Image (cartoon, rainbow, N blue to C red):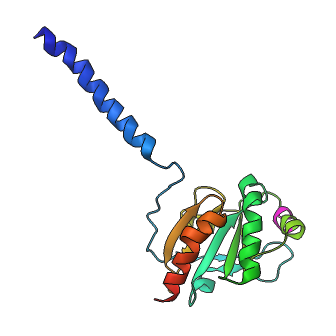
Amino acid sequence: MKRLMYLAPLAVFLVIAGYFAVGLKLNPRDLPSVLIDQKVESFALKPIKGYDRGFSSEDLKGQVSLVNFWGSWCVACLAEHPMLMKIAEQKLVPLYGIDWREKDPDAGPQWLKRRGDPYTLIGDDPESKAAIAFGVYGAPESFIVDQRGTIRYKHTGVIDEGNWASTLWPLIQELRKQ
């Protein structure tokens, strides 16, 4: 009986250690989305200051698109921006921007004026209406949306040469064939 008393804490320790071992193998950048393979909820965003046209869910229909959530306050967005400019310059895919949670309405337009504007259209989302429609957790986050307006992929973090070439661009090409 005494021997069993010593084995109980060992068993509890092994169970906890097993959970930690599994957790260490997970990628903390992978934030699953229940919205994958779901149509984007309807939204219509006003343009950012100084722009004539906003961005809505209707703009996503009929073509494979890349939707990028960013903000002038986002340090990682600054690192990602040169890659977005490269994608835009090569005209590989319509790239839509959502300026998310700006406190100052001048901040986003000024940020783009200094760094360049890679976006086909940009919507202003200070109240997270589109962010909720996409299930955004933070910035930058990007989504591949197919011709029917269905979210097909969510990318959390900076788009760089590596993940563009290995994941995003091949998926865009594959979706265009469908």
Picture coordinates of residue 96, whole percent (x, y): 68, 76
Picture coordinates of residue 46, whole percent (x, y): 73, 76
Res 56 quadrant in image: bottom right
Q: Residue furthest left?
A: 1
Q: Nearer the viewer, residue 84 or 150?
A: 84
Left or right: where 164 falls relative to 39: right
Picture coordinates of residue 132, whole percent (x, y): 56, 64
Q: Nearer the viewer, residue 102 or 149?
A: 149
Residue occupying the point 67% across, 62% down: 127
Q: Is-magenta flag for residue 122?
A: no
Q: What is the quadrant of the N terminus in the image? A: top left
The correct choice, above or below, for 18 with respect to 120 in the image is above
Residue occupying the point 76% across, 65% down: 81
Q: Nearer the viewer, residue 47 or 150?
A: 150
The correct choice, above or below, for 21 with respect to 140 in the image is above
Residue range corresponding to the magenta coloring? 105-109
Q: Is residue 136 visible?
A: yes
| Type of secondary structure dominating the magenta stretch | helix
Q: Residue furthest top?
A: 2
Res 90 quadrant in image: bottom right
Q: Is-magenta flag for residue 108?
A: yes
Q: What count of labels does the image hold?
A: 0
Picture coordinates of residue 108, whole percent (x, y): 81, 65
Q: Is residue 120 visible?
A: no
Residue occupying the point 54% across, 76% down: 170
